[in-house]
Amino acid sequence: MHLAESTEIQAGTATTNFRVVDDTGRRWFAKVYRGQLQRERAAIELAEFARLGGVPVPEVRRTLDGELIDERAPMSLWEFVDGETAEGGISGARWSTVGTALGRLHRRLAEHPAAAPALRAAVGVRDIGRATRDFDQLIAKFRARESLSPFEEWACEAAEERRALLQRAGAILASLPELTVQVIHGDLASPNLLMRGDEVAAVIDFQPPRPRFTSWEIARIGCDPRTVLLGDEWIDGLAELLVAYRDEQPDARVDDLVSTVAVGCAYTLGSTFPLAEPPDAVTPSLELYARARHDTALRMLERLTDVHDRLRDRLSAGG
């Protein structure tokens, strides 16, 4: 490939990204890595595995030697996909199309040789003991400082509020049945879902193959703060997503699907991200996300029983 034009794209945290145009006018997406190449290579291999199963994943272009990553840069090169991220939230017809894409993704990744699907106790979603220690350390760190920025003052209050809810989060997880664990995408948040209109254009930025709870991954996209805070429409919308998911993944268990909100709520309550980020890493957009994530966790907690019952009724009725 002969380079004609290159423009940096202000997106991504672990990579530096570029839109590249070759001398034929074809566009590409280049990712220059700063992390461990072995880990990045495993993530690309998982993306390729998903793509071969019909999941909308951009095609990676190998080097002349057949490698996924050119270690001299180091970088990988992908087909460029037109679309916008789902960071504006999911609404309308997107609920069903996202559910279909997610169901297809999980159906394919259930076949990955790294780990077969299995049932695990839901308490494994979040280590509440470790979360308690993390919050105690974070709160102590805030209180030890002579002065705090406005964001840090809020972050300390949010940490104290979440710390007080950790026992409740643990009880929520303990009340759930065993849930499915399998290889999943690993980071399926709205920035990693490209939309073209109401259709899913591409699923991007996979993590290395690792078995995790499918309910957790569904919650990451279906209960994304950018969606939940749009209004209560997310409850019926999530039901639409789950019905479409099950249509595409017939092996999906009702327990996994109806537990989505409980899992997402408990996991978020026990997370110190991004409250614990160093001050110089807290951009205005990250601050907005921190506040939205906190408010979303509390909103899910408030509506948990109602939403759980509505999802079970909808799925038990067969969609």
Image: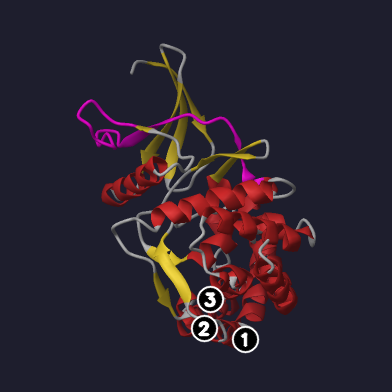
Which residue corresponds to the image point at 51% horizontal and 64% vertical from the top-left? 252
Across and down, in percent, residue 263 comes to: 57, 73
Q: Is residue 275 above or below residue 122?
A: above
Classify residue 299 as left or right of residue 126: right
Q: Is residue 64 magenta?
A: yes
For disc 3, the marked residue is 138
- Please tell me whether mark 3 or mark 2 is closer to you in this view: 2
Amino acid type, label 2: Thr
Amino acid type, label 3: Leu
Disc 2 packing (10 Å; few <14; some 14–19; many ≥20): many
For disc 1, the marked residue is 168
Specify the segment rendered in magenta: 61-87
Marks 3 & 2, CB-CB < 8 Å contact: no
For disc 2, the marked residue is 132
Q: Element under label 3?
A: helix
Across and down, in percent, residue 19 comes to: 48, 27
